[in-house]
Image (cartoon, grey):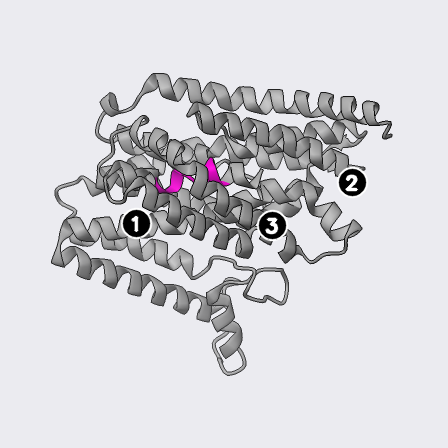
Amino acid sequence: MAWSLGANSNSPPFAPAIGANAVSTMRAAFLIGILAAAGALTQGGAISETVGADLIDGVAITPLGATTGLLVAASFMAFGVYSGYPVPAAFATTGAMVGVGLSLGGDPALDTYRRIGTFWLLVPPVSGGLAYLTATLLRRDDVPDTVGVPLLAGVVAGILANVRLGVIPHPERAQGSVAEAVAAAVGGVTAVPTAFGVDPVVVLVTLAFAAVGFRFIRRRTRASVEKGIRTFLLALGSVVAFSSGGSQVGLATGPLENLYGTALGLPAIVLMGVGASGILAGAWMGAPRLLQATSREYAQLGLRRSIAALVPGFVIAQAAITLGIPISFNNIIISGVIGGGLAAGSAGVSRRKIGVTVGFWVITLVTSVAIGFGLYRLLSTTLGIA
């Protein structure tokens, strides 16, 4: 499953960069593997817990249940890799685990479904809308590239200061951010009270990161607008690939949470390491095919529209990780690609490809529930497991 995720769902972050000829396909696949594996190790815990424990009430996922769910989801992923149509990993895994949980005799976790479903429904309009607006602004003659692109870089850098990482301790949760770590380090000497529930040191660190990002890209764009934009596009692809690893690894490791934590008593980092290794191998071995499909067939993007496609992807991915919501990176990035492409007219967007892809998404969610339910019932009956 992790291999399929590395080949499928971790590929889209670099697709706009390849479409804009900012990086080669093979180099992008290499970078995706390294960055997504790092994201899996440091950010994967929240999504893994949701998939493993929060989708079904009243029962714990058994080893046979985990095997069944992963088999169903990985089969959908492998089909997407070899057919060239990106199958949404979150849809396949969520559907499969819900089907298995129901077959085990569990109750539907309706509150979780409403929360996840609302987020999923908001992704296409939010991602596509933000990409459209960003691409439109970047194309305006009265907003020079030496101002617009560095401002976006500043926003991304400011968000990076607040990205939650498992390697940074936090007193109230499993993951902390760089800004929070700095605030904790100086908390004993600062006399400035917390305002609106936000530590002022966190705000200052965020602004410092934003200033550094703005200044770096501004210097690059002043020296050469094209090189500066390409630099920012590659940086965006890198942080989005990192985020994709953190959000996607839980789809592979979530079903195994009960086995690794309760039955085997192993720390979570061991399970994350297994998932990260699979993502790394999948990205290196299977990503190039899907990279070609997503970068060439959905829209012929330029540099500015490619940036517009990635910025909302990064924001939405980090929001999902913070909330512990499994998401489809194909859904996010493809929506952004479409929104950025429409900013210059619909001629570069393949409507047939979009329609077929959306159809695959719906079919994946519905059929994965049914197959997960039926396959677990068949295996448990055949093997004599209650």
Name the amino acid type tagged 3: Val
**Badge 3, how many Cα within 10 Å: few under 14, some, many 20+?**
some
Identify the residue shown where x is 63% and y is 44%.
253
The residue indicated by pointer 2 is: 60
Residues rendered magenta in the picture: 6-14
Q: Is 331 left or right of 220, judged from the image as shown?
A: right
* Residue 318 versus residue 302 in the image, above or below: below
**Secondary structure of residue under mark 1:** helix
Quadrant of the rendering where the C terminus is positioned:
top right
Q: Which residue is at the front of the view, 229 or 318? A: 229
Residue 138, located in which quarter of the rendered image?
top left
Q: Write down the quadrant of residue 168 in the picture.
A: bottom right
State the residue position of label 3.
274
Visible residue check, residue 1: yes
Q: Earlier in the sequence, mark 2 or mark 1?
A: 2
Q: Give how far across and how far down residue 30 sits, in percent.
A: 38, 47
